[in-house]
Image: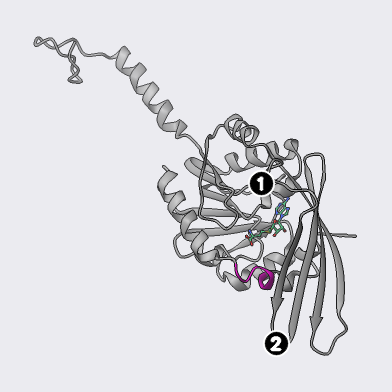
Amino acid sequence: MHHQLFYKRLVKFYDLIYANKNYEREARFVRDLVLKYKKSKGRDLLEVACGTGRYLQYLRRWFQCFGVDKNPMMLKISRLNAPNVPTEQADMITLKLNKKFDAIVCLFSSIGYVKNYANLEKTIRNFARHLKPGGVVIIEPWISKGKFIVGSPHLETFSGKDLKIARASVAKRRGDISIIDFHFLIAERGKTVGHFADRHELGMFDKNKVLKIMQHAGLKAKTVQSHFKSKRGLYVGVNPVRELARGIRLRARMGELHSAPPRRDGAFSNGVKK
Ligand SMILES: C[S@@+](CC[C@H](N)C(=O)[O-])C[C@H]1O[C@@H](n2cnc3c(N)ncnc32)[C@H](O)[C@@H]1O
């Protein structure tokens, strides 16, 4: 069985399978969250695992965007869907760019592909390292273990005049890892029907453990509800403005060293009453 064929040889069918996903509405929601939580001044946004660039297509209206993904075939389509948005092939587990961002987003369950907690820790530390002080990261999780129903059947279809696609799967599990064996039937005009089997393995992470990992990476972390189709909510992590905090502490110390004598009216020179 192939692994992630959907992002490689079958990549031209990706946007058709998700034709009904409202990327524009979700991108607007992400925009509003970023603007609500970020404390930095800039508008540099990185989408990790940007796929075919369907979010970038909208996010580029409001942000200076950059996209990374592990699969170069996905990035090729991203450059068509979101022209002028630079992209780079990169694995989120080892991500190292020479740039920091005001916002990093990782959406549509992509985080699940890191599979285990060790990789998740590395990935979230990478996100934190690529944030400016006051920057924000938004992660849309994959399904949690508690909600995953082993044995449940799933079907997505696309029906065009010259092309019909059916993608069927039955959910399986190995410990904390969900196993999705997609079976594609692709009927194209004038060709014999193609059948492709494609395995996707995604880690199912516990919400409290994810929040702890985000906090250990130095982020102020919480979950928020979303209007996304998945209804799984989103993780929001803010990189505290450490420089500002350090500056405040430093100024406080300097104040102690050079403190002006109390005024005769009994107030300190900063106006605070004794
Ligand atoms: C479900 S798709 C989501 C793509 C896009 N964000 C969207 O919403 O359409 C998952 C994406 O994660 C990418 N991916 C999987 N593992 C990755 C990794 N370790 N680092 C970066 N990208 C990865 C895949 O290539 C694929 O494009």
Type of amino acid under label 2:
Lys
Front-most of 232 and 256? 232
Front-most of 245 and 120? 120
User: At 15% across and 13% down in the image, what residue appears?
Assistant: 267
Front-most of 169 and 46? 169
Quarter of the figure that contains the N terminus = bottom right
Q: Position of residue 222 (x, y in %)?
A: 52, 37
The stretch drawn in magenta includes residue 19: yes
Give the residues drawn in magenta, as a range: 15-20
Quarter of the figure that contains the C terminus = top left
Residue at numbered disc 2: 161
Helix, strand or loop at mark 2? loop
Residue at numbered disc 1: 96
Front-most of 45 and 220? 220
User: At 63% across and 61% down in the image, what residue appears?
Assistant: 87
Q: Where is residue 227 in the image (x, y as percent from the top left)?
A: 51, 55
